[in-house]
Amino acid sequence: MALLELKGVTKIYQQGKIEVPALRGIDLTVEQGEFTTIFGPSGSGKTTLLNMIGCLDKPTSGTIIFAGQELGRLTKKGLAQLRRCNIGFIFQSYNLIPVLTAYENVEFAIRLVGGRSKREMHEKVMQILADVGLAGLENRKPGELSGGQKQRVAIARALVKEPKLVLADEPTANLDSKTSEEVLEVMLKMNQELGTTFIFSTHDPRVMTYARRRLEVRDGLITQDTRGDGASVSH
Ligand SMILES: Nc1ncnc2c1ncn2[C@@H]1O[C@H](COP(=O)(O)OP(=O)(O)OP(=O)(O)O)[C@@H](O)[C@H]1O
Ligand SMILES: [Mg+2]
């Protein structure tokens, strides 16, 4: 079973009397373990597509099936639960809680899922922070971290609950090119070690080369779907 299946997904935003078609019929299948990028011009629908997949918004028409569950058939509560347990998010502007330390930002995410003892949660948080290269920085607040370090906290926060899927909307847009590549290396490492599926959008051609599958979106449609071993692409 595919992890994710989109069939004929459209999204039309209503701007007063004007209809803005942001997605015009997306058909897409994503298997567990993929490391996929979405690229395309500004306004082509990348964020809209990620928001539909992440249950942050509903399509105007079409169906989305996540791990065998049709999203349109779930209640609001069911959707929220699916999102909380199965989907991690990474944003361009990190979206960390400024008054909490790196440790507390990550712990907060695992607490929301529940079902683990305090000790288990502590070990998990420390492990994932070490995995993303933040050992020793657990007690820093976001304001005391560099952009790349903040994004590593966000990656740890997305992964600590062991979601099936991580969605990242331009995760490196605020980072310089060297730091962008380091952040991508961390994402790729976690994809390879944990088998977590990643879908990330980007404008950066260097960042795209890390993906094993590249989807081009133009005018609300997927216009290219290419596969190649990201790891072997020279950059
Ligand atoms: N909430 C909204 N209300 C109305 N129109 C919207 C809304 N969000 C997005 N749009 C429109 O939908 C289209 C797709 O926008 P989207 O944000 O998905 O593009 P994008 O590919 O992520 O662009 P960028 O690369 O600039 O982030 C654009 O025409 C945009 O203006
Ligand atoms: Mg966008």
Image (cartoon, rainbow, N blue to C red):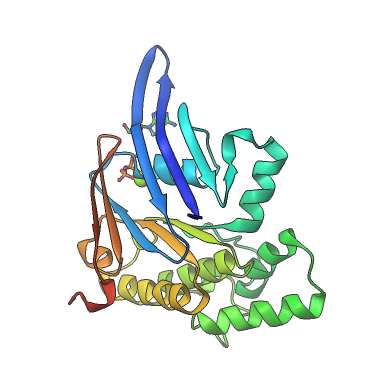
- In the displayed structure, 67 sits above or below 133; it is above
Quadrant of the displayed image that contains ligand 2: top left
231 sits left or right of 146 in the view: left
Q: In this rendered view, identify the residue nearer to me: 155 or 63.
A: 63
Q: In this rendered view, identify the residue nearer to me: 67 or 197.
A: 67
Q: Residue at x 31, y 56 (%)?
A: 202
Question: Number of callouts in the render?
Answer: 0
Q: Residue at x 20, y 62 (%)?
A: 205
Q: Position of residue 161 (x, y in %)?
A: 64, 66
| Residue situated furthest right in the rendering | 117
Q: Position of residue 155 (x, y in %)?
A: 50, 68
| Residue situated furthest left in the rendering | 234
Q: Position of residue 62 (x, y in %)?
A: 45, 31
What is the quadrant of the C terminus in the image?
bottom left
| Residue situated furthest top in the rendering | 17
- In the displayed structure, 42 sits above or below 159; it is above
Q: Residue at x 49, y 83 (%)?
A: 133
Q: In this rendered view, identify the residue nearer to me: 229 or 211.
A: 229
226 sits left or right of 66 in the view: left
- In the displayed structure, 35 sits above or below 132; it is above
Q: Position of residue 38 (x, y in %)?
A: 32, 52
| Residue situated furthest front in the rendering | 1
Q: In this rendered view, identify the residue nearer to me: 118 or 217.
A: 217
